[in-house]
Amino acid sequence: MTTYTSTHKTSAPAQTRASRVARPYLHPYLAGILLGLVLFGAFFFTGNGLGASGGMNRLVVVVEDFLYPAHIDRTPYLISMAGGDRNPLESWVVFVTIGTVIGGFVSGSIHGRVKLEVVKGPRTSTRTRLFFAFVGGALMGYGARMARGCTSGQALSGGAVLSVGSWAFMLAVFAGAYMLAYFVRKLWN
Amino acid sequence: MAPFPLNLVELLGSPQYFLVYLIIGFAFGAVLEMAGFAVSTKLAAQFYFKDLTVLKVMFTGIITAMALVFLASGLGLLDYNLVYVNETYLVPGIVGGLVMGAGFILGGFCPGTSLVSAATLKIDGIVFALGAFFGIFLFGETVGLFEAWWNSTYMGRFTLMELFSVDTGVVVLAVMLMALAAFALSELAERKIGKQTAKQPRWRYGAAGAGVALAAVVLFVGQPTNADKWAAISAERQPALDSRAVFAHPGEVLQYMNDRKIITLLVDVRGEADYNLFHIRDARHVPYDQLNSIVEEFHALPENAVVFVMSNDEAQAVEAWRYLVAERVVNVYILEGGVNGWLNTFGEQDFRDSALIADAAPETLRYQLAMAYGDRHPAAAPHADRFNLAFEPHVVLAIKRGPASGGCG
């Protein structure tokens, strides 16, 4: 399972020979244990779990608030984030989100996995891949806000503290993906 | 008092405390990247049973964090009341989950992994993240069309232990065992369908054993009861009780009832018969054994809320105060002298003279009421102007600790 990326080259500044070639990923269980420790640390020190879509939401709202502040003040859903002189960036989840991007980049750089490329199934054109990436992203974003959290904020965080809604949500995500997987198999296989 | 989670705002100040979240996010992003979650084909392989890394990493993360959270809570280090548990909106959650599942298999990421993918310059990750921004924007603009549905099937902070009415440790152990079973099936699928031949390391058996052992310890240690929680904080809070700093004079309670800037909650813990005979207007009837039903609601109160508990005298109210304080409800005070003291303060002179029961037992109503007045008695909502009361104010509104909102909020 770890043979997957053995041939990727890196565009990051290579200091050692080891970082010139993409290094293998962590074993899934080891990665999972580390993920669990990060999540536990978040709960233990702050009382909050992890999140991603909430932070992305606030980044969207910041732009909206800059362009049409009056529109924010008339939309109940957006008021809670940026109504009046409220700053949508003053939220813990924004900083988790920014940290996630930096952490991903640093880890990718260290392990020689930062590379400008399109990752796609062997029988998919780049155009198709990018089209579906956008459509999938839009569905993901829409669904995540409808469910009040994404895979990180609901399934992972809520799952670990045993929320009923989070477990129902998690099963629904897997069910939705598995139900559709057969019909789009050409995208990935 | 369970020392964790920390009150970061008080400890570090704002905005410095955001640095902690930045570090947590950094670790999160790094782990996702190291797991291979920046690569869409690796994520999508999950749904063809070829490479079940997604399930393995996610569930290992969940069971690790779960076992540690409830172990820390069982040992009295972490206050589970202050840990954010995603509130359940069942139907919108499930429908949103199905939509996300579709987005997952079409786009190959979830929001968090797409950020990591974009950070490692995968163009499909960047496009997906842009799509996610668009979807989020679209939701904000369209949720108004179905807001009632979006807020439906609300169940509050609803946990699996409450759903199945079992101890926390039982759920922890069951989830642990189910996850391990799912891992065994995943490895079978990877061998049969994914044709993976790489030998799996042996340490994973040790890790699985450690996981089960940890869950068993959680079950054995148990979770702190209300009495345990009080015992842990009694040294800190008992002095306030002894010095009567948490007793509020009836005049002060009346003042808060009339203060529009403050949300005043009156909690009447007496029996139903006494409550029906007389209670202060807007007092809620919550018998002592049902106090746990209001804890969650009171946690969600804003900072300008104050709670006054009352019984006929003070003894039962003190117990109720202990209960709520141990459950981390903030700004809880006791009505000084109880309902009897209230009637003594605000009852008319002739009522007090004629209705007084001289040899009333403690914690019973000391005034004879002609009928079940409820809150229709003149003393239930006295006019503040008519009483010129001198009292020393005791209420000090405290800053709340722990998350008021969380999740992907």
Image: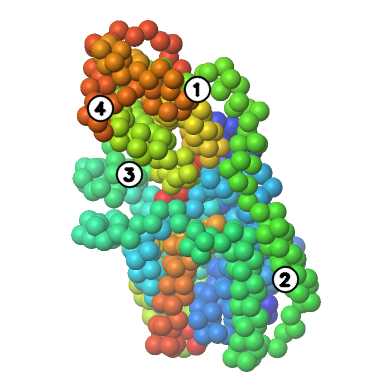
Q: Which residue is mark 3?
A: A80
Q: Which residue is mark 4?
A: B370
Q: Percent position (x, y) of residue A31?
A: 66, 66
Say which of marks 1 and 4 sits in front: 4
The numbered mark 2 sits on a residue in which chain? B
Instruction: Report the residue at 68% width, 57% height from top.
Output: B218
Height in image: B274 above or below A99? above
Marks 1 and 4: CB-CB under 8 Å?
A: no
User: Which of the colour schemes (rainbow, by chain, secondary structure, one colour) is used?
Assistant: rainbow
Same chain for the residues at labels 1 and 2, yes or no? yes
Question: What's the amino acid at mark 3?
Answer: Ser
Height in image: A123 above or below A1? below
Q: Percent position (x, y) of residue A78?
A: 29, 48
Of mark 1 and mark 4, the one earlier in the sequence is 1
Question: What's the amino acid at mark 2?
Answer: Ala
Using the numbered discs, state the Cα–Cα distance from disc 1 to disc 2 in whole angstroms: 49 Å
Look at the numbered disc 3 and give the secondary structure of its residue: helix
Q: Is residue A117 left or right of residue B176?
A: left
Using the numbered discs, state the Cα–Cα distance from disc 3 to disc 2 in whole angstroms: 43 Å
The numbered mark 1 sits on a residue in which chain? B
Q: Is residue A144 left or right of residue B81?
A: left
